[in-house]
Amino acid sequence: MQSATRFSNRVSATHLPRRVAVRASNKGFGRVRLAKTSFIGSRVFPAAPARRVVAPTSFPGVVAVAAPEKSTETATKRVYVFGKSKKEGDASMKQLLGGKGANLAEMCAIGLAVPPGFTITTETCAEFHQTGKDLPQGCWEEILSALADVEAEMGCKLGDGTNPLLLSVRSGAAVSMPGMMDTVLNLGLNDTVVEGLASKAGERFAFDAYRRFLDMFGNVVMGVSHSLFEEQLEGLKREVGVELDNDLTAENLRELVKRYKKVYETQGISFPDDPLAQLRASVYAVFDSWQSERANVYRSVNQITGLTGTAVNVQTMAFGNMGDTSATGVLFTRDPSNGTNELYGEYLINAQGEDVVAGIRTPLPIAQMATDMPKSHQELLDNCAILERHYKEMQDIEFTIQEGKLFMLQCRSGKRTGMAAVKIAVEMVNEGLITPEEAILKVEASHLDQLLHPQFEDEEAYKDQVIGTGLPASPGASIGQVVFTAEDAEAMQAAGHDVILVRRETSPEDVKGMHSSEGVITQLGGMTSHAAVVARGWGKTCITGCSDLQIDEGAKLAKLGGAEIHEMDWVSINGTTGEIILGKQPLKPAELAGDLGQFMEWVDASRTMSVLANADTPEDATVARKNGAQGVGLCRTEHMFFATEKRITSVRRMIVAQDTETRKAALKEILEFQRSDFEGLFKAMDGLPVTIRLLDPPLHEFLPAGDHEEVVAQLASETGVPEDIIADTVDKLEELNPMLGFRGCRLGITYPEIPEMQVKAILEAAVNVAKDGVKASPDIMVPLVGMQTELQNQEALIRKVADGVFQKSGTTVNYKVGTMIEVPRAALMSDKIAETAEFFSFGTNDLTQMTYGYSRDDIGKFLPTYLEKGILQVDPFQVLDSEGVGQLIKLSVERGRATRPGLKVGLCGEQGGDATSVKFLHGVGLDYVSCSPFRVPIARLAAAQAVVLAKNKK
């Protein structure tokens, strides 16, 4: 490798970022290093030590820089080389090398043309952040050694004025985070090297590369706004009378480089001429970007946890901007929007990679390459087929063609929509590439969630309201009110509005606003632009490249197709067709048919755990069964009370009754509608189990809203009970901590006439539908039990009522009596409780509240802080706490089944529809989970994936 002397003969303080200090070292003669204070923002980038003795600078107090001492070999290997002559990693090392680094090594191993380079590990990133943002001892020496390997393979050297090596520096975590971290291209250029590159590859190419490097390095590493460079570029184009960057001459680009250098000066920053200083600072910048706001937001939104950090991939540059025989592009081996088995992507002739993804120039469709560059196109097709067969997965590929030679720069599993995920999985099975069990692991819970979203009811009906079209970057149907900034999208979504974000183009800084939006529209960009890739990954509807769209962000106004769209105007967007439609267009529910129907057949054939639904009405039960539910795991009887004004009035008469006879009279009215609703549930679930929870909430929840006097007056008017008696009753119902108060089985024990009425309604309904040939199997669940004696009390009551119903009707139906395990004491005493209970159902909402000591209603006050600081990784009311609450469940199952081996055990909390939770519960041995009707397909998939993953571990 070439030392700094080969292009400048010195390391000067003016060549390094602000606040560089060159200090005498106790080890050796001296080293260049940065002071422990930031030069811009909060970044600290130590300078690279030179490898040869160099001439002293003219600055007072600056000593000559000597070659660093050879470091002793470190126990931890931090740098892995990849290339034709040396291959040190493979695809199995994603946790250490990141997805990009591991796949670069793997592509080298299978013989594809990959520019050589090296990967600095994710563990190094973790150490970097743990030790004050500095490289670990010996790491820089490993980097220099790896760089020497790359130089040897390429036959050129970093910083050489006659035969220079240029590098790219990119991020790459174990989980793909497109656009969320930093990249630097064309590293190694300075005023000397650019002239050598010009004599070798042409003046225009060299200075185009140099101005790109100055822009990207300034923005990513030095913290200079990209807009300052963009202003200079646009100003020069206006001066010379051209529209496109490619129309600038070599002379124009020389002038642009001077202007870019001036941007540095105006910001009080010196551009570092030393390529080693550039390299070290760029590595620091990429590591630093792991903790950037956009990266943290992306990980939070996608619930990405447990990663060590990002790797840094330093790779030889391949140039797509060396004329009409060069190009660069991004593609997917199958369409990531709908799954069609054809190359999907874009490329630009005479361009570099950022031109494609940034949306600055509208790229060409990949199919056109067959005409423009037929040889390279065929080679690309062959490489794509090799990669799909090798990985058994749809690939996201970056490539560059340099003077007719194809280089593969990256491959990774491609982000895709729900529709594409299912189609790709099914077609790969049909092609014999994977098995049905492997297909089950190709589809994520979020993919199914997307497919269950509504679609437009009638696409022909809105045609006269279409005001424009763009590229259908991410499919789906979205409706919302227009906003023009990411900040406004966040604010309006927080205020309860559905919004559509309209932008000229998006950048990584817009990710929070994009996630807050129902859909995104951009004026610029293609099918692989930032907006398109991020939106597809999140299942957000997205339309890009709507060139007719005119946006005035200051005035919060857009114009399209002769229409003016103001902030907060309603629009509908069809991400499948690219249509932008005025107003709110009607939607219809999704259907489980076609490829999805076939896929779900494989899912159901693989899983062993049943999936039931939480359904409180016959309508809910019908939807649940349509979505594949195998019964009702939770019917909350109290939800029936609010269906009509007449019903809630009867309930309130029961609450304010001053004696048992009056209370029973009100309960008789309630029994009528409860029995009717139960009959509807049994008919909807004919032949399937229905679990009905007896009354759980405290009685005050059924009182009218308002202040004390208003409540008393309304209840007196509705029930005819004097106000003074009502006032006394309301006062008695007031509780300091209702969650732990007078509710659940405590109500039933105190007022036995309430559970008597409910049990009678349940069993009379079962008897009635049985006469019509409907098979009803009610499971009667007693809530909030903490002691066996509580359950024994209620079980005796239930059996007595059941005997009366069966004797009177002359018909008997099978039923079970069980309990909801939601009190930690009940979990601990499950062996005793199972002596009485015929089934357990874990109510993880309350079990989580009581185990953590968190109120579900109040956790919002501190949950964002806990998530931001990493105290909690996820919301425990959405994802089951396997370490705490999960262990109570595991213990309860073991103790319950030790007493009653055939004990039926399930879960009916919110976590029953969460894929991660379902996989844990499968391992614990639950018979079923129950979730909302619309989450049933997701739970079915998670249950199947749990089985496949368990098999794969054996």
Image: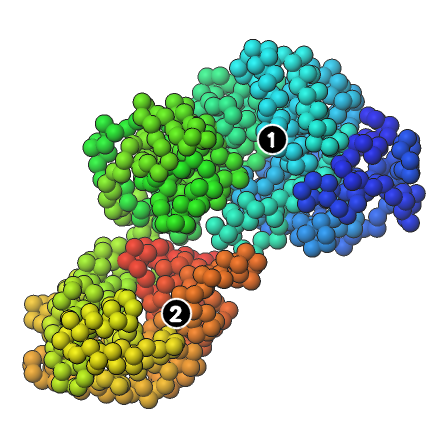
**CA–CA distance between discs 2 and 1?**
49 Å
Residue at image coords 36%, 66% = 909
* Residue marked by disc 1: 226
Query: Foreground: 597 or 291?
Result: 291
Above or below for 646 versus 316: below
Residue 345 in view here: no
The residue under the point 43% across, 74% down is 850
* Residue 431 % position (x, y): 38, 40
Q: Which residue is mark 2?
A: 844
Task: Please tell me how crowded label 1 is: few (under 14), some (14-19), or many (20+) other residues with Cα within 10 Å.
Answer: some
Give left or right: position of 632 versus 138. left
Amino acid type, label 2: Thr
Q: Is residue 305 visible?
A: yes
Q: Locate the N terminus by quadrant.
A: top right
Query: Judging from the image, what secondary structure is the residue with disc 2 in?
Result: helix
Residue 19 position by quadrant:
top right
In front of the other: 572 or 540? 572
Place of residue 865 in the rendered image (x, y in percent of width and height, measured from the top left): 53, 59
Residue at 62 percent across and 18 percent down: it is 322
Q: Earlier in the sequence, mark 2 or mark 1?
A: 1
Q: What amino acid type is highlighted by mark number 1?
A: His
Q: Quadrant of residue 911?
A: bottom left
Crowd tier of the residue under label 2, counting other residues whose Cα lies within 10 Å: few below 14, some 14–19, many 20 or above: many
Would residue 557 be found to the left or right of residue 359 on screen? left
Residue 591 x %, y %:
25, 47
Q: Please state if 73 lies on the left or on the right of 369 as rendered.
A: right
Q: In the image, which is nearer the foreground, mark 2 or mark 1?
A: 1
